[in-house]
Image (spheres, rainbow, N blue to C red):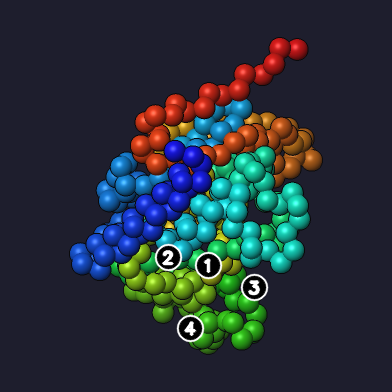
């Protein structure tokens, strides 16, 4: 089978999978994933979704993608992985479209030991590919996760709501609920009004928008998400979580999960940082970043036939 026919079959399979997943959700209702849980909904079986293999000099990272978590995003993102899907860029340069895919040659430019690794971007932060955030609060249990204590209410007020208010100011895009809560805090000097409020409402007050019918996933160890640009948009920068981060659940769009090679991501996360051990240390910027040397989309059929790429051995000096 030539490459063109293979690509056509892959996309036909992907569309059918998304349609079938949507039908199941409508018929059976949303699955429940507890906030902070390290368990992922079992509907993402190994024989149901494609895998994306990121090759590096220290080993391969295999990501199983979740079409029913963010179907519109995944359709565009897989095209980007293949090296297309850049038509949203106003004036792409010749080297923006790479034969090996968008991520081929990109480095992991942010490496926080045992916590997270993040790819670099080919473009300035707000000029690259952007994805509309697709999140379902109910499937994550955010409508049932309520603030129970005054201490928690004060933490949310100080570290989330006041910060969001400061960033948005009094612009027209500021949610009315956020303005109402800030005014109430100024009038009463108390955060008690937040006790009993669900996490979904807290996030919506900060500008996050949710829709029903998705199987959104929590940000736990192994989760692969797109780094947000705002509450409603994400960039193409890939974040691989190495620890549970419940504070991101419902805010970061998880598009897949590492099923092989999480130890490779761990190795990448602990590389020496720029200026490490000195006052000039760069914040989680690796001295010698690990580069993605190849990227490939595989269905389970091709995954069984094709062995994982071996890590490239450094040439003897």
Number of labelled discs?
4
The residue that label 2 is drawn on is 135
Q: CA distance from mark 3 to mark 4?
A: 15 Å
Please tell me whether residue 63 is drawn above or below residue 131 in the rendered image. Answer: above
Residue matched to label 4? 177
- Is residue 187 visible to the viewer in this orientation of the structure? yes
Q: Nearer the viewer, mark 2 or mark 4?
A: 2
Q: Quadrant of the C terminus?
A: top right
Tell me the number on the disc at residue 132: 1
Task: Looking at the image, tell me whether mark 2 or mark 4 is earlier in sequence order.
Answer: 2
Query: Which residue is located at x 52 percent, y 74 percent?
Result: 207
Q: Is residue 138 above or below residue 180?
A: above
Residue 87 vs residue 61, the one in the foreground: 87
Q: What mark, if any, has residue 90 been given in the picture? A: none
Please identify, in this view, whether the residue under mark 2 or under mark 3 is nearer the observer. 2
- Residue 122 in percent (x, y) is at 70, 51
């Amino acid at each position: 089978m030539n490459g063109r026919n293979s690509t056509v079959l892959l996309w036909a399979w992907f569309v059918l999978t998304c349609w079938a997943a949507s039908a199941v959700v409508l018929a059976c209702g949303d699955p429940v994933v507890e906030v902070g849980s390290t368990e992922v909904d079992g509907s993402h079986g190994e024989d149901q979704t494609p895998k994306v293999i990121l090759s590096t000099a220290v080993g391969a990272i295999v990501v199983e993608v979740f079409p029913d978590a963010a179907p519109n995003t995944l359709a565009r993102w897989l095209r980007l992985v293949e090296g297309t899907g850049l038509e949203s860029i106003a004036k792409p340069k010749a080297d923006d479209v790479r034969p090996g895919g968008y991520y081929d040659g990109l480095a992991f430019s942010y490496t926080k030991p045992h916590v997270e690794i993040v790819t670099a971007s080919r473009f300035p932060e707000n000029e690259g590919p952007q994805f509309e955030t697709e999140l379902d609060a109910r499937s994550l249990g955010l409508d049932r996760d309520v603030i129970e204590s005054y201490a928690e209410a004060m933490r949310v007020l100080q570290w989330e709501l006041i910060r969001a208010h400061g960033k948005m100011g009094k612009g027209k895009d500021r949610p009315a609920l956020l303005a109402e809560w800030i005014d109430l805090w100024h009038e009463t000097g108390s955060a008690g009004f937040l006790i009993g409020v669900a996490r979904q409402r807290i996030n919506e007050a900060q500008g996050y928008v949710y829709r029903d019918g998705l199987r959104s996933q929590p940000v736990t160890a192994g989760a692969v998400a797109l780094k947000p640009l705002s509450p409603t948009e994400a960039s193409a920068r890939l974040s691989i979580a190495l620890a549970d981060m419940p504070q991101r659940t419902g805010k970061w769009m998880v598009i897949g999960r590492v099923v092989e090679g999480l130890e490779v991501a761990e190795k990448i996360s602990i590389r020496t940082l720029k200026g490490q051990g000195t006052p000039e240390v760069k914040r989680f910027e690796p001295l010698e970043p690990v580069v993605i040397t190849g990227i490939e989309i595989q269905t389970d059929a091709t995954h069984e036939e094709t062995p994982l790429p071996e890590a490239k051995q450094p040439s003897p000096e």
